[in-house]
Amino acid sequence: MRHPAGGRFEFHHVDAHSEHYNPRGRLRAGEVTFPCSDGSVDLAFGASLFTHLLERDARHYLRETNRVLRAGGGALYSILPPAQAEATLRGGEDRVEVSRDYFEGMAAGAGLVIEERLGELCGQETILLRKP
């Protein structure tokens, strides 16, 4: 759907399966292909997205992010830091907690670099990733 702001934004709904939120979804999260061409996106945004993705699905979404971002493009994502300091990644689809270091490692594994740690927003850690 084109946003009325001059067509500068597009929003897409993906019918991804989630045992907790969308049990009738037709696609498993690991099967989702972002509806964008390779290298066509300037900025991807996901608020409270990774707080509901299991690790394998989060890694897949980060790889998809890398695929669709243009060189130099960014992704603004939030994560929920774990309540226990020693935890790296824990929880289920209703609440996934991941440490910043662990998330940044997953992002690096997908070919993304940390541009800036923006701090807390609504109780979540916000991170700007960049495609080199």
Image (spheres, helix red, strand yellow):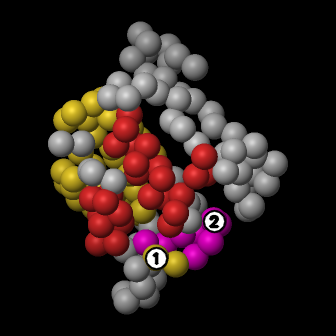
Q: Quadrant of the C terminus?
A: top left
Q: Nearer the viewer, residue 92 or 108?
A: 108
Q: Percent position (x, y) of residue 8? A: 39, 17
Crowding around mark 2 (Cα neighbors within 10 Å: few <14, some 14 to 19, many 20+) is some
Q: Which numbered tag is attached to residue 26?
A: none
Quadrant in which residue 131 is drawn: top left
Q: Quadrant of the N terminus?
A: top right
Q: Nearer the viewer, residue 86 or 3?
A: 86
Quadrant in which residue 107 is drawn: bottom left
Q: Farthest right residue?
A: 24
Q: Which residue: 48% across, 53% down? A: 60
| Element class at badge 1 | strand
Q: Which residue: 44% across, 13% down? A: 7
Q: Which residue: 43% across, 72% down? A: 98
Q: Percent position (x, y) of residue 19? A: 74, 61
Say if 39 sits above or below 30 in the image.
above
Write down the residue under mark 1.
89
Residue type at tag 1: Leu
Q: Which residues are magenta?
A: 91-98
Viewer can see residue 74: yes
Relative horizontal placement of residue 95, taking residue 45 as reference (left or right): right
Write down the residue under mark 2.
93
Q: Which residue: 65% across, 66% down? A: 94
Q: CA distance from mark 2 to mark 1?
A: 12 Å
Relative horizontal placement of residue 21, taking residue 12 as reference (left or right): right
Crowding around mark 1 (Cα neighbors within 10 Å: few <14, some 14 to 19, many 20+) is some
Q: Main secondary structure of the magenta part?
A: strand
Q: Percent position (x, y) of residue 70? A: 27, 30
Q: Percent position (x, y) of residue 118? A: 25, 56
Q: Check if residue 96 falls in the magenta segment.
A: yes
Q: Check if residue 83 falls in the magenta segment.
A: no
